[in-house]
Image (tube, rainbow, N blue to C red):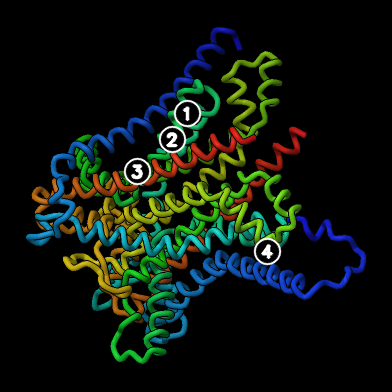
Amino acid sequence: MQEQDLAPPVALPTLSHAARRRQLKEKAIAALITAVAFTGIAALVLILVFVAKEALTLVTDAAAREEASFSKMFLPQMVRKGKPLGYVWQPVSNVPKVSMIPLFIGTLKTTAVSMLVAVPLGIFGALFAAEFAPRRLREVLKPTIELLAGIPSVVLGFFALMVMASFLQETFGFTSRLNAVVAGLGLALAIVPVIFTVTEDALTAVPRSYREASLALGATPWETAWKVVLPAAAPGILAACVLGFGRAIGETMIVLMASGNAAIVSWNLGDSVRSLSATIAAEMGEVVVGSPHYALLFFIGVELFLFTFVLNLLAGMWTKKVIQRLKGGAG
Amino acid sequence: MKHATRKVVGLSLVSLTALAAFIMVAMLAFILLDVVQGGWSHVSWQFLSQAPTDGMMGGGIFPALFGTAALTLLMTLAVMPVGVLTAVYLHEYARPSSFLARAVRVAVANLAGVPSIVFGLFGLGFFILFVGKGLDHALGYEELHWAQPGILWASLTLAVLTLPVVIVSTEEALRAVPQEQRTASLALGATQSQTLARVVLPGALPGILTGAVLAVSRGAGEVAPILFTGAAYFLPDLPTSLNSQFMHLGYHTYVLATQSPDVEATRPLLYATVLVLLLLTFALNLVAVLIRTRTRRKAAAGH
């Protein structure tokens, strides 16, 4: 690995033919491996380019620009003559209505429900695993959460749809069986493991010396956990929440199966909702390739990509911050 | 704060965290119990070996099992070389602080966070409409041959999705190979690539296998990316070529759960399908965990 560092800065003796060939071969192999390593970067760029490319007709094509202009997507529109302006997502009708606002609201509602449930559960559970649990219990807890993370999202969607929906409707009397609460709770199952794992990593990264110092000053274990360890790991925990948030925004199958898929503008959590991701999944099957509606679905894909990209960058920055802070502080 | 108050606050905080942990475990247990209870009695050899019948209200899931297996096999063949070589670059060849290595790391971390449905759009836009159309054009096909959803495009899409899983676990495996072994090999006159091929990679093999198994278990359960890249609603025939469509356990679950005309009649079938899917992913995860603990123990014993 450090061959270059070890090489002396003097003139090399002339190499034999075989040695030069071997050197050439080594260089070729290194070049090949480096080239393959570009795949990750290439994939990320290609994803953005090719999803955006199909959405481009919204800008380049006059008919599409007319039918799905940005003002129609984001500003209130007249839906019927004489009625007040409103936000309607109805891309397949005589007069297509393409407001993104109901989809934004739907995504926000399911995500909010899932975060409200998953953040306290994940953080407190991680605090228990990292600080309070006996070693035996911790060794059971972590693989169990990993198992929860291993459940495919379509199974969680199935569970939310078949079991949770009826139970919640009987308990809370929702008018629609499938709604933002059902989808949000299903989503919470998917993001709890993310928040738990990342938080637990951040908590265990806090050096033992912090805890020992706090205990030596007379603080109890819970005071140490709450006032020393938790604040020290704060950026990492924030990163955990941001990662969970990104996952919840992009998750598709759970919302597609358990939300009711009705694009309604309402802040009532008991109403059916339609999210951005579920809209792509539900409508791509019947859309005419190249039509404005088709371009719109890809445009939603671009939005999702950019949202989650920014969230992931933030989470990455905060994770790095917690490591730097702890290294600096402990050194 | 008084001593007694401190004690009460402490006790309630600790029990609150214990409660949170308990709720997570209980949710998992509840899901598993429900699926096992609902599906156990319906899983049989016939169920596993027959095609669906009666408009998917009867019969088995063999085409879906076969499709899932074929899909993940192709995916693994595509993702492993790329993932392993990228990890080798990051851990064996690049300086950790070099711009390229940092860029690759950031890209891989972000790739892991791209929503799965966006991978589906990418598969449609890139593999089918760009690569597939280009192939059809180049090979002179009059009708759509490659420029349509099929198992090859679906597995390549999944390969891109699981790339971060493979890279991360391979890097971990490379880290577990002791530095002394590399130094010893180089000191004996082996070149870097010889060291890599005969010392480092064999030493890291169990960890690399773990990565493969994890990728398979992740890829086998993903439905959103294959919605428009190759999964078929109902297809009793098995896929015969790389551009055939295929049935898939996860997609089959989605279809049975949401599009069935008679929910009560399909319920046992649905539960049994979910049970098979869960058993499959859990078994794979278990294999990964077993290989990992065994390698760790070996590594610990070797030091």
Label 4, secondary structure: give it: helix
Question: Quick one: quadrant of the N terminus of chain A?
Answer: bottom right
Left or right position of B51 against B254: left
Q: Which label number is shown at residue B100?
A: 4
Nearer to me, B290 or B11: B290
Structural distance between the alpha carbons of marks 4 and 3 = 36 Å
Q: CA distance from mark 3 to mark 1?
A: 18 Å
What amino acid is at disc 2? Pro
Q: Quadrant of the C terminus of chain A?
A: top right
Alpha carbon distance from label 4 to label 2: 35 Å
Mark 4 or mark 3: which comes first in sequence?
A: 4
Secondary element under disc 3, as helix, strand or loop, is helix
Amino acid type shown at disc 4: Leu
Distance in Å between CA atoms under marks 2 and 1: 7 Å
Q: Nearer the viewer, residue A132 or A39?
A: A39
Residue B11 in the image: state x and y as whole percent. 49, 15
Residue that badge 3 annotates: B282
Disc on res. A139: 1
**Which residue does the numbered mark 2 point to in the structure image?**
A143
State which chain disc 4 sits on. Answer: B
Q: Disc 2 and disc 3: Cα gap in Å? A: 12 Å
Q: Which chain hosts label 2? A: A
A275 sits left or right of B39 in the view = right
Q: Are marks 2 and 1 in contact (CB under 8 Å)?
A: yes
Up/down of A160 relative to B66, above or below: above
